Image (spheres, rainbow, N blue to C red):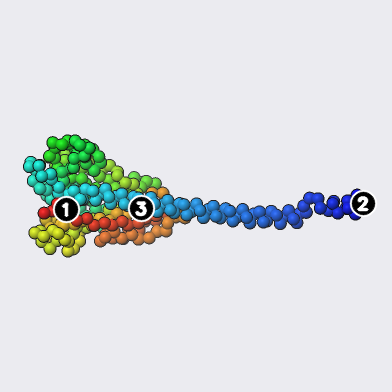
Amino acid sequence: MNHREHRLRSKQQGLSIVELLVAVVIGMLLLTGVIQVFFASKQTYTSNEAASRLQENGRFALEFIAQSARHAGYVEPANTTAGKPAPVAIPGATTCNTPQVCSSDGAGNASDTIGFVFQPRLLEGNVRRDCLGSVVGDASSTDLIINQFVLIPAANAADNPALGCRSWNINDNAWVTGATPAPLIDGIDALQIQYGLSASSSDLNSANQYVSAERVTALNKWNDVAAIRIAVLANSVARTNPPTPARAYVLLDAAPIVIDDGRARQVFTTTIKLRNTF
């Protein structure tokens, strides 16, 4: 090996400070890109999770109420001990009992309550159950119940309001499992109900107008209720990242509701014809 070859090999060994700094800068740029992709993916996942949760809450809340609404006014043909009840309990009437378990109209944007009267279906061969799944009789039972749906407010800012239910046994004149509503679905901020009125009580096949419970009482039209319109405001339970900005939500004829707690929200609405009104 001559002196020139030895000198060339010495120059090729190791990295210079400039080369090292360039490599570090390139590495940091690549790492920054990877971190940005990671956080973007995390935010997308969080948003999708929040959307799925609030969709689930809203749909399940409507389904729970709709199940009772579809059976409202139902009495088995073999049940000769009970007369045909009004599908929706009438405020102030004797069917409301004490304490009152019938429908009411929330003032402003306060949530409504609604109670459906019917004879529970026979399930599992030999039992009848209320909205909470509690047994209210067997195959021989002729009792009528009122499934009442209410909004259970949050205990504090960290908690979430929920859709709750409790049942009143008309025959026993008592609550089935207690007067305190039990939660069914978390993440329900508001519940609003409108009642579809037919032109006359002799024709309940269609509804011509939808009004609040207060208006039905004022018009003395409870016998003309042919359908109900239900609206719930559901949230994602967990706060989104970034937080969802505040906005106003309108449920039917209620005043706008403005909430700013970083949770995603959506209004869900359905209309159900009362089948057992004739």
Residue found at x 22% / y 55%: 272
Circle 3 sits in a helix, a strand or a loop, which is it?
A: helix
Q: Which sits earlier in the primary sequence, circle 3 or circle 2?
A: 2
- How many residues crowd mark 3 within 10 Å: few (<14), some (14–19), many (20+)? some
How crowded pointer 2 is (Cα within 10 Å; few <14, some 14-19, many 20+) is rated as: few
- Pointers 3 and 2 in contact (C-beta within 8 Å): no
Q: Which residue is mark 1?
A: 275
For residue 215, above or below residue 148 = below
Answer whether residue 274 is visible to the viewer in this image. yes
Q: What is the crowding at mark 1: few (fewer than 14 residues within 10 Å), some, or many (at least 20)?
A: some
Q: Which residue is mark 2?
A: 2
- The disc labelled 3 sits on which kind of residue? Gln
Give the camera-side residue of 174 and 127. 127
Residue positioned 64% across, 54% down in the render:
28
Closer to us: mark 2 or mark 1? Answer: 2
Q: Which label belongs to residue 59?
A: none
Q: Position of residue 138 (x, y in %)?
A: 17, 35
Residue marked by disc 3: 55
Three-letter residue code for mark 2: Asn
Q: Amino acid at mark 1?
A: Arg
Task: Measure the alpha-carbon separation of dots 1 and 3.
Answer: 27 Å
- Residue 52 in percent (x, y) is at 39, 52
Spatial separation of the CA atoms under disc 3 and disc 2:
79 Å
x%, y% of residue 135? Answer: 21, 37
Q: Position of residue 10 (x, y in %)?
A: 85, 51
Nearer to us of marks 1 and 3 is: 1
Quadrant holding the C terminus = bottom left
Left/right placement of residue 74 relative to residue 235 reads left
